[in-house]
Image (cartoon, rainbow, N blue to C red):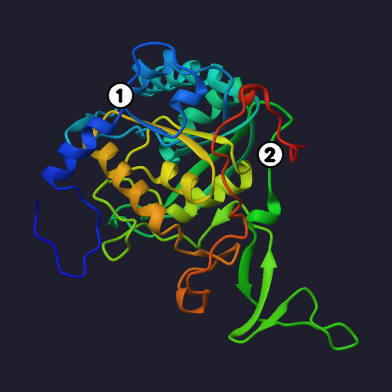
């Protein structure tokens, strides 16, 4: 294990932890019920596990597959493909995904700008594409012959016209620069707090309030493409309800599963890398003691660099008790907040 600075909070697993956590990971070799697979981390190739997953049970799918560029994921190398080959590979994922989703399910698919060009037409063939979210990824190398690439896309899709979208759960708390008042002097669409004037606003599809995990953040790992917990919280709160089942077929270091647990959703996570799966289990254990999500407090999302203004030790008003067991007709359940 490499030496790190004393203040570096990057999560790792020692050799002993890897040996301890390894047996707690699962893999599928035959059909399994929803009750038996819920809240599990599968150390397995997605294509091996998918045929055994129960059908029409997933409320929300969050997918962050390798983009079409060569990258080493700690020994598991994904090599860039031709455009046709990548599209064929991506279509094979969708073929496995589609039977798992409820008719009321939502899916979010992450990509970079170059991969977006390839997958958007394929998503439109199978699902209803509702929007493209673009978020600012402030890290990245500069270029002397091109614009620096510091954005990524998330495609928002649904299986049908009936889906969950909780707009009140994903509002942003922004500082008011021009605090207008009604004629009687009362605030117009803003509130006054001890540390300033704020307004709750509807979120757009351009996200500039995210910080890519870095060494001083407790959620940080050595995964090369780790997404922020705050990003996952937006997707999960908007498009699922407490007790719903969230699937991430390319789990990586576990962010989707960890945030789902913190927000009282159930999860299934799958990844081919055993070390990543062990990181996910360790993060899940830590989340039981600390369910906070950086940038999300008091039931709202805050702008970047406002940590000192956010309530300490105070998290979502969405914190409802998670059902201890799933009802027998879980796969056929329809959410009351769908529209």
Decide which of tag 2 and tag 1 comes sooner along the chain.
1
Residue 228 higher or lower than 33, as above or below: below
Q: Element type at marker 2?
A: loop
Query: Quick check: 265 left or right of 82?
Result: right
Residue 217 higher or lower than 320, as above or below: below
Q: Tag on residue 164?
A: 2
Residue receiving disc 1: 44
Binning the other alpha carbons within 10 Å of mark 1 as few (below 14), some (14 to 19) or many (20 upward) gives: many
Residue 266 on image: x %, y %: 51, 37
Binning the other alpha carbons within 10 Å of mark 2 as few (below 14), some (14 to 19) or many (20 upward) gives: many
Query: Quick check: 109 left or right of 83?
Result: right
State the residue at coordinates (35%, 18%).
Answer: 28
Determine the image quadrant of residue 271. Answer: top left
Q: Element type at marker 1?
A: loop
Instruction: Look at the image and tell me in which quarter the C terminus lies.
Output: top right
Q: Nearer the viewer, residue 181 or 276?
A: 276
For residue 150, say whether it is visible: no
Residue 69 higher or lower than 81, as above or below: below
Q: Tag on residue 149?
A: none
Determine the image quadrant of residue 196. Answer: bottom right
State the residue at coordinates (38%, 32%).
Answer: 250
Determine the image quadrant of residue 70. Answer: top left
State the residue at coordinates (26%, 40%).
Answer: 278
């Amino acid at each position: 294990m490499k030496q790190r600075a004393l203040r570096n909070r990057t999560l790792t697993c020692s050799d002993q932890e890897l040996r301890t956590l390894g047996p707690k990971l699962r893999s599928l070799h035959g059909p399994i019920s929803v009750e038996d697979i819920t809240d599990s981390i599968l150390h397995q190739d997605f294509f091996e596990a998918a045929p055994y997953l129960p059908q029409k049970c997933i409320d929300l799918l969050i997918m962050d597959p390798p983009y079409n560029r060569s990258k080493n994921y700690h020994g598991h190398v994904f090599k860039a493909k031709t455009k046709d080959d990548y599209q064929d590979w991506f279509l094979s994922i969708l073929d496995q995904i589609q039977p798992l989703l409820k008719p009321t399910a939502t899916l979010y698919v992450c990509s970079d700008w170059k991969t977006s060009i390839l997958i958007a037409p394929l998503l439109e063939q199978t699902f209803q594409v509702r929007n493209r979210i673009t978020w600012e990824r402030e890290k990245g190398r500069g270029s002397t012959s091109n614009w620096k690439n510091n954005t990524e896309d998330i495609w928002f899709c649904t299986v049908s016209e009936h889906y969950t979208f909780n707009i009140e759960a994903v509002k942003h708390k922004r500082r008011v620069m021009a605090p207008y008042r009604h004629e009687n002097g009362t605030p117009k669409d803003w509130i006054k707090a001890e540390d300033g004037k704020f307004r709750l606003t509807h979120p757009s599809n351009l996200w500039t309030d995210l910080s890519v995990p870095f060494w001083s953040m407790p959620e940080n790992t050595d995964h090369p493409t780790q997404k922020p917990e705050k990003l996952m919280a937006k997707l999960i709160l908007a498009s699922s309800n407490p007790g719903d089942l969230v699937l991430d077929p390319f789990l990586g270091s576990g962010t989707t599963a960890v945030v789902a647990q913190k927000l009282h959703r159930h999860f299934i996570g799958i990844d081919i890398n055993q070390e990543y799966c062990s990181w996910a289990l360790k993060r899940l254990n830590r989340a039981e003691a600390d369910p906070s999500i950086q940038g999300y407090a008091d039931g709202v999302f805050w702008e970047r660099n406002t940590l000192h203004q956010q309530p300490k030790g105070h998290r979502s008003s969405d914190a409802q008790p998670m059902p201890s067991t799933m009802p027998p007709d879980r796969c056929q359940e329809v959410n009351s907040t769908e529209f």
